Amino acid sequence: MIGEIDIVRHPVNACVPLRHKVVLSVWAKGRGKLHYQWFNYVLKDGKKEVCEVPGATQPNLTIRVTETQNYSCRVNDIYSNCRFTKWSHVLALDIDKSGLPPEWRGEPHIAVHPKPQTLRPGAKLTLRCTAFGVPQPKYQWYRNGTPLRQCTGEMLQVMQAGVQDAGTYLCAVTSVLGESWSDPADVDIQLTRPSIEVTPAAAFTATDKVALLIGNLNYAHHPGLTAPVMDVHELGLLLQQLGFKVLSLLDLTAEQMSAAVHNFTQLLDTGVYGLFYYAGHGFERAGRNYLVPVDAPQPYHTSTCVCVQRVMGKMQEKRTALSVILLDACRKWSKEGGTPSVIQPLRPTGNTVYGYATSEDAEAFEVQDLGKSTGIFTKYLNKHLLLPEKVTHVLERVSEDVDKDLLVKGKQAVEIRHSLKEARSLTDPVHSAGHTRELRLREVSWRHANELPQKKCLKYPCGAEVEVGFSALFSNVLVVFASIKRSQPHVVDCTVALSSAPAMEDIFSGHGRSEDFDSLLFGQFIEPGCTIWLCGLQTLEEPLFIRVDLHYSVHESESVRRCTQSQKLNVGKPLVASCGLRNKTVSPKHHNAQAYNANVSQERNQGPSTVQGFSRKAEGLPHVTVGRNTPEEHDEEDTLNFIHLK
């Protein structure tokens, strides 16, 4: 029987220079002595035929590669059982191999690096990265440090390049023997002459773009919110289109927020564009803005919240080319009826932009319209974000739209402050010339925080096969999904159930989930019943295990027996779990945001549907005076100069 022989290791694919020596190997197990015969393709009468390789009757086959060829090995025993290995594709490249080390052992070695290019919009973009390797290496292309989906070959092609394709490209070449990175290739998209009203897009460039997005919604001691989920998700997708390395996080405690800000600012450097965005509860005190973590006690206190001005101060210390802070949170003063706060000047380093969703002592609102939850400010921010305009001009467009919105007219007005000395735009291209070392360090750090587990195929004793895949909704939310790829005639009614150890919270389930949650969660998965969402990965202290239970029925003579087989999959510490943000969290209460927030109910002009707005104001602010003679705890370093702010 064929099953008596087991091929433990098949010969690998290889990519080598012409006339290079390659050893192909097969490892098989069976009863008694095994016999081997290697085969390859031979051209006969203009057609390729499978023929025996003369004298190739050992487990190892040594060849001197003179052309691209395929090889397979037949393994048979004395009982007339036989098995064939998978075909091994040996690719012979007639290209320069001068840089190949004399003692090369097959690790990835890049022979052809991608070249910089300057193109007109609509032209074809072609980048090539070719590497030797035994086994044949895999490719992954990156633009501005962000991996490009489905760009996993040695050739990257864009049939009609646009401004969104400009940036710095790198290719990672990997195998089980190691990893190698290509030289960076800058791609310029040369625009035609702009109109008089548009600033030339090529006037300014960034050495890199980095963004930290935080959305807090499930509060332990305060009313919950709904919109931050979609706000952070949609904004993150738009920023990725602009070439930003995006770290998006939901439901962070005070310690986790501070750690995330620290890690974020470590990735900033001279010439980098840095963007910080927050959606959640907030308040203002003594001219400073505070962001409320999910574990903040009642009442709020500055010592248990995150000071925005301190975040900007840390960004400024890195001398970024552009620092942007966008806050979709309330700014109610800590004492009702207090005098307006006095804004102290910020260090005049320039190129600093604040975009506040609302003005001083005012609330910021989120709305739900036909199941769609969004913050009013972020709704219009996402509308204009991709415009190739100066950052402040984009925010002015946002301000105008918010002012026209009947839901919040007279209740919420965007406030913009900046010390922007140059007409920099979020759409400015990335050029890393002279900064390649720093760029690669950021890429390694960013890739580490966004690394997904590899897809796995699990084989069960009953003969069924289940494929387990992974995706990331946010940097601290892992999506695990499973599907049955193969079954057997005697195995019917198969279903798969997933669970994790340790158990991770699912913040998307439960009462009050809006329709846009469902769209976000189920839009990319066919079988939601075979999917789990593991949230709060920053709290992981040990490797994460996924349990995959296969339930199936077996038909017996007079009955049907229900069976279960299980396997565990170790996925390590995926995404942000390995970045040191964890601390012990409190379990948030399950809030329905619609139950307790100020209602702003009005009818839209275009239809009868009712839209309700919910405040993101801070609850339980202590009644203390705004002015003070001595600094509060944790506020000593918050005195920053706001000179030249508009």
Image (spheres, rainbow, N blue to C red):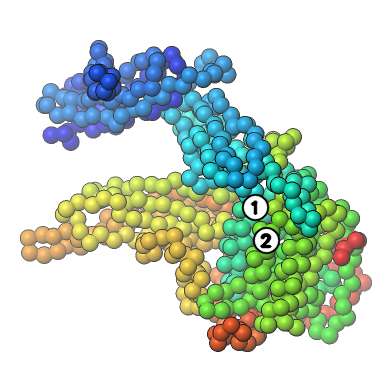
Residue at the outermost top position: 55
Question: Is 272 rendered above or below residue 91?
Answer: below
Horizontal side of 166 relative to 111 (left or right) equals right
Q: Tell me the kind of residue under disc 2.
A: Leu
Q: Position of residue 397 (x, y in %)?
A: 73, 67
* Residue drawn at the location 41% of the way across and 24% of the way down: 91
Instruction: Report crowding for label 1: few under 14, some 14 to 19, many 20 or more residues within 10 A (C-alpha).
Output: many
* Residue drawn at the location 60% of the way across and 72% of the way down: 374
Q: Tell me the kind of residue under disc 1.
A: Leu
Kindly check if marks 1 and 2 are in contact, taking CB atoms under 8 A apart as contact: yes
411 or 543: nearer the viewer? 411
Marks 1 and 2, the one that precedes in the sequence: 1
Quarter of the image where the N terminus is located: top left
Asked where in the image residue 391 lies, by quadrant, the reply is bottom right
111 or 45: nearer the viewer? 45
| Residue on which disc 2 sits | 385
Q: Position of residue 493 (x, y in %)?
A: 22, 61
Per the model, the C-alpha gap separating discs 1 and 2 is 9 Å
| Disc 2, SS | loop
Q: Position of residue 324 (x, y in %)?
A: 75, 58
* Residue drawn at the location 89% of the way across and 72% of the way down: 342
Question: Is 433 rendered above or below residue 355?
Answer: above
* Residue drawn at the location 79% of the way across and 49% of the way down: 321
248 or 334: nearer the viewer? 248
Q: Is residue 126 visible?
A: yes
Question: Is 408 rendered above or below residue 276?
Answer: below
| Residue on which disc 1 sits | 242
